[in-house]
Structures are given as structure tokens and as C-alpha cells.
Amino acid sequence: MITVFRKEHFNAAHRLHNSNLSDEENETIYGKCNNEYYHGHNYELEVGVRGENDPVTGYVIDMKILSNLIKTHVLEPFDHKNLNEQVDEFKTLIPTAENIAVVIYNKLRPHIDSSKELLITLYETPRNYVTYAG
Ligand code: NI
């Protein structure tokens, strides 16, 4: 089994806020990410596809195909967007790095051959990152 990775980047704004909690609780839990006027992050995304190397092509997945999938399903809808206001999934889901990684996974999963594993790693800052593999 081999894992191949494609790195991508997008900028997006968000606000972490749970309307079921008080303003004080939101401030305590989310700190600066609770800023009611939103703020941006430079997200770094790594998409990994793991599986057998195809004996004909020598590829796990054609990177042009993977790159185009990420462009269509992640970068175009997320880049330079306000995630809370402009991305449907986050109208009802708090756009934490965890939830963004799960949404990215769910958007890409139907387009990757079911014999392959999909691994999403999302850096919200150079030091804070999450990984999700379904
Ligand atoms: Ni934030």
C-alpha cells in the first residue's frame, strides 16, 4: 500500500460560535476565533490517497485528477470565502478545523475509488492541524 499526497492552500474567514451557549461561554471556549466580525486563516490542506499501486499506470491515483477534484470541490467553494456565510455546510455546523476536515472528506470521498483510503490533513495555523480519515 502506498499513500500519495497533494498539498493545496486556501484562505478563508470564519467565526466559531455556538448560539446555544452564552456569549461568555463562547468567548471562553473559542477565544479570538469567536470574534463577531470574523477573521481569516491561511489553511494548508493535504489530501492523501492510499491504496495499491496500479500495475498498468504505476499510479495510486493520477495527480492531475486528484488536483482537479480538490480544485472543484474544495478550493472553488472555500477559497476567499466567509465559511459561515457563504458555504452551505457551515450554516449549521461550526467551522472548526475538525469540521472543515470532515466536510472536505465528505465532499471528496464519492469521487475517489472505493478501494482507496482518503486522508485529510488540514492546518489552520502552522502549529495547529487536524487529520481525518473517515
Ligand atoms: Ni479561527
Image: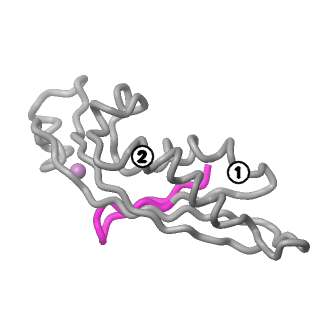
- Residue 112 — which label? 1
Image side of residue 90 versus residue 32, left or right? right
Q: How many marks?
A: 2
Residue placed at 49% from the left, 59% from the top? 131
Looking at the image, residue 105 sits to the left or right of residue 54; the answer is left
> Residue at horizontal 48%, vertical 61%?
121
Q: Which of 37 and 54 is in front in this view?
A: 54
Residue lying at the far top in this picture: please name it.
20
Q: Check if residue 11 falls in the magenta segment.
A: no
- The image quadrant that residue 16 belongs to is top left
The answer to whether residue 132 is magenta is yes
Q: Give the range drawn in magenta.
A: 121-134
**Picture quadrant where residue 58 is located:** bottom right
Identified at 53% across, 53% down, the residue is 70
Q: Where is residue 73 drawn, in percent x and y?
A: 52, 44
Colour scheme in use = one colour
SS type, badge 2 = helix
The reply to whether discs 2 and 1 touch (Cβ–Cβ < 8 Å) is: no
The percent position of residue 57, horizontal first and vertical second, equals 84, 72
Name the residue nearer the viewer: 89 or 99: 89
Mark whose residue sits in front, 2 or 1: 1
Residue at (77% x, 51% y) in the render: 113
Which numbered circle lies on residue 100? 2
**In the displayed structure, would residue 5 be above or below residue 84?**
below
